[in-house]
Image: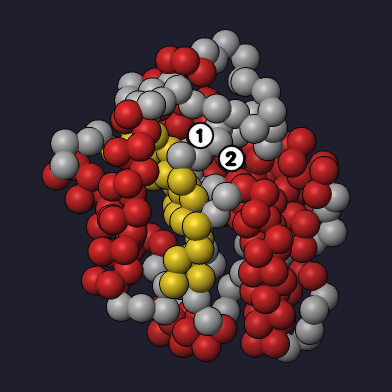
């Protein structure tokens, strides 16, 4: 596969020419089906003979537990929340993502820096500052953004959860005192930020309002093309 690229600078001690795996990102809001399809894709890729590694938000052995605990109090400032997630990402980058890419794995990311950047910008961070925070992030071989309608998102969210999440509803952003209205407005702002970032970062927008089998077949077809392209490079 083709050597990995980075957005701005290489992490210290990393030789990009040695990172011959593939990095594929599945983005989208909660209840868009990301985790379900990551599981299906992992099984399918392994059946095709690929070694697969999964990464995502709040999975760092260093800070994931502390980050989850800190979020329970609903009192983190936007900057603290941002840097907490950045630490989570870079610990995974050093200890999971880069070793897997070096070993030739296909790395499936259940969300990536784009969600973190969108969240930070919606909470008032300067885009240039946020981009600088993730300057050492590897450039994915493909990014698939699962786009769902507001109605589908609301229906799936309430099917999966008895109540709305404080942070996923943007209650810290002061959008509305009503949790449901805040959820809708916050998710709309996140979606708008993804649309803004799409042309810059090359997302492929995928219709996620469809059934699981239909979306699964679509993603597999797209990923097959990505892997065929990277293996020829």
Q: Badge 2: how crowded within 10 Å, few (<14), some, or many (20+)?
A: many
The answer to which of 206 and 54 lies nearer the viewer is 206
Q: Which mark is residue 92?
A: 1
Position above or below: 185 against 197: below
x then y, percent, for residue 228? 30, 38
- In this view of the protein, can residue 222 be seen by the observer? yes
Q: Residue at x 40, y 68 (%)?
A: 33
* Callout 1 touching callout 2 (CB < 8 Å): yes
x then y, percent, for residue 36? 33, 63
Could you tell whether 3 is left or right of 178 in the image?
left
- In this view of the protein, can residue 77 be seen by the observer? no
SS category of the residue bearing label 1: helix
x then y, percent, for residue 39? 29, 55
Q: Specify the quadrant of the image occupied by residue 40.
A: bottom left
The answer to which of 85 and 100 lies nearer the viewer is 100
Question: Which image quarter holds the N terminus?
Answer: top left
Q: Residue at x 80, y 79 (%)?
A: 175
Position above or below: 39 against 129: below
SS category of the residue bearing label 2: helix
Could you tell whether 96 is left or right of 51 in the image?
right
Question: Which image quarter holds the C terminus?
Answer: top left
Q: Badge 1: how crowded within 10 Å, few (<14), some, or many (20+)?
A: many
Number of numbered markers? 2
Position above or below: 227 against 105: below
x then y, percent, for residue 12? 62, 14
Could you tell whether 65 is left or right of 55 in the image?
right
Q: Provide the residue designation for mark 2.
A: 88
């Amino acid at each position: 596969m083709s050597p990995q690229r980075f957005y701005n600078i290489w992490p210290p001690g990393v030789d990009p020419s040695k990172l011959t795996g593939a990095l594929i990102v599945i983005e989208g809001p909660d209840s868009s089906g990301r985790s379900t399809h990551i599981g299906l894709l992992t099984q399918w890729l392994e059946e095709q003979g690929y070694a697969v590694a999964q990464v995502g938000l709040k999975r760092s052995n260093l800070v994931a537990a502390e980050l989850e605990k800190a979020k329970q109090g609903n009192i983190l400032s936007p900057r603290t929340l941002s840097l907490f997630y950045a630490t989570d990402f870079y610990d995974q980058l050093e200890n999971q993502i880069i070793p897997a890419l070096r070993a030739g794995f296909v790395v499936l990311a259940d969300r990536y820096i784009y969600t973190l950047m969108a969240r930070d910008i919606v909470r008032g961070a300067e885009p240039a500052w946020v981009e600088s925070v993730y300057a050492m992030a590897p450039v994915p071989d493909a990014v698939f953004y699962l786009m769902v309608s507001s109605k589908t998102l609301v229906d799936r969210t309430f099917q999966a959860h008895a109540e709305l999440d404080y942070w996923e509803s943007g209650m810290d952003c002061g959008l509305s005192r009503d949790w449901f209205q805040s959820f809708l407005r916050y998710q709309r702002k996140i979606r708008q930020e993804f649309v803004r970032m799409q042309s810059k970062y090359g997302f492929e927008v995928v219709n996620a309002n469809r059934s699981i089998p239909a979306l699964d077949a679509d993603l597999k077809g797209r990923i097959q093309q990505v892997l065929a392209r990277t293996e020829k490079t």
